[in-house]
Image (cartoon, coloured by chain):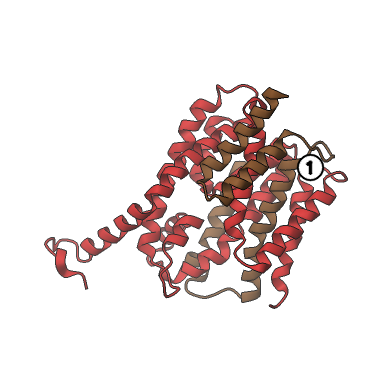
Chain colours: A red, B brown
Amino acid sequence: MRGWRSGSTSRVTGSTTRTTYRQGARRIAPIGAAAGVFGASFAVLSHTAGIDGIAAVVMSATTFAGSAQFAAASVLETGGGVAAAVAAAVLLNARYAPISVTVGDQFRGSILRRLLEAQLIVDESWALSRRSDGSYDRRLLIGGGLVLYGCWVGGTALGALVGDRLGNPERYGLDAAFPALFLALLVPQVHSRRALAAALVGGAITLVLIPFVPAGVPIIAATAACLIGWVRT
Amino acid sequence: MVIILVGLATVGLKAVGPVVLGGRQLPPTLSAVLFLLAPALLAALVVTQAVGGERSIVLDERLLGIAAAAVAILLRLPLLAVVVVAAAVTAGIRVLS
C-alpha cells in the first residue's frame, strides 16, 4: 500500500512498520507528558502509604497500570492491609482481561513476544489504537504504549526523588488528591448507564460499610456492584 | 509483597487476550461484568478516600477539595490540574481555618 518509502529494501515491511509505530508514539505524546507527571505523583502519594521510592519505581515498571497502583497504595495508606490492597488492585485490573481480548487477534509471534507486547496494553494506548470500524491497530497500540511506559516509569523515578523529601502530606492537601484522582479516573469509565449504576451502587456499599468493617473490606465488597453486568439491557 | 502479587496478576490479565485466547472471544456476560469492576471499584475508592476514617465517616476539608476537583473535571481540565486543584483548595482551607 504505502510504497512511497521503499528505499530501504533490507527490511521488507520496515518502512510502514516504523511509520505506524511512530504515529502511535506521536499521537500519544500529550498523554505521555501527563503520564509522566502522574507517575511522579504516584511516587509522592505512595510514599505517604509507606511505599519507598525504589519500590514505587519497581511497581510502575512491572504493573504499569496507574489506577491499580494508586488503589493498592491507597488501601495500604488507610490501613487496609496487604490482602485488601492486592485484591483491590487486581480487581481493578480485571478489566484488562476483556480489553486484551478485544485486541488479541492482532498480536503475532512467539508466546514471549505476545506476552511482552501485551504489557503495553493500558487504557490510553488501547483507546488510541481503536479504528473507526471497531477493530484495533497493534502498531499504534505498541508505539503509544512504549511512550506511555517510558513516561510512566521515568515520572515515577523523578517523583521518588522528590517524595522522600516531603513532610506531612496533609499540609499539602495530598489526602484530597487521592480521591480527586480516583474521581477523575472514574468519569471516563462511566460510559454507559450500567457503568453509572455500578459506580453508584459501589459507592453506596462502601459508604454503608465503612463504620462497621475493617479498612479495605468495603472496597472489596463494592465490587459486588459489577454483577449489574449480568442484567440484560 | 503487594508489588510482586499485583505485578504478576496484571501481567497475567493483560496476557489473556494475546497469549491465552489468541483470537477467540470471552462470553459477553463475563466481559460485561469484568468491565463494570473498574467503575464500581473506583467509586468505592473515591468514597473511602473522601469520607473514610478509622471505622467512621469523617467530613472535613477534603470534601471541599474534592468538590473543587469535580468542577475541574466538569471543565475538562487535565488530570494533573484536577489533582492540584483538590490539593491546593484543601491545603488552603486548612491554612485559613
Q: Residue at x 54, y 75 (%)?
A: B25
Q: Position of residue A232 (x, y in %)?
A: 70, 78
Q: Is residue A20 above or below residue B60?
A: below
* Residue closest to the eye, A16 or B13: A16
Residue labelled with disc 1: A215
* Residue closest to the eye, A9 or B57: B57
Q: Is residue B44 left or right of residue A140?
A: right
Camera sees residue A39 = yes
Q: SS at mark 1?
A: loop
Chain ID of residue with mark 1: A
Q: Position of residue B17 (x, y in %)?
A: 51, 67
Q: Residue at x 72, y 40 (%)?
A: B63
Give the position of the C terminus of chain A as an image quadrant: bottom right
Q: How many marks?
A: 1
Camera sees residue B1 = no
Q: Residue at x 54, y 30 (%)?
A: A53
Q: Amino acid at mark 1?
A: Ala
**Quadrant of the rendered image containing residue A200:** bottom right
**Quadrant of the rendered image containing residue A192:** bottom right
Q: Position of residue A35 (x, y in %)?
A: 47, 44
Q: Position of residue A75 (x, y in %)?
A: 70, 42
* Residue closest to the eye, A71 or A58: A71
Q: Is residue A54 above or below residue A206?
A: above
Give the position of the N terminus of chain A as an image quadrant: bottom left
- 10 Å neighbourhood of mark 1: few (<14), some, or many (≥20)? many
Q: Is residue A203 left or right of residue A60?
A: right
Residue furthest out toward the right: A212
Q: Is residue A83 left or right of residue A172?
A: right
Q: Residue at x 56, y 59 (%)?
A: B13
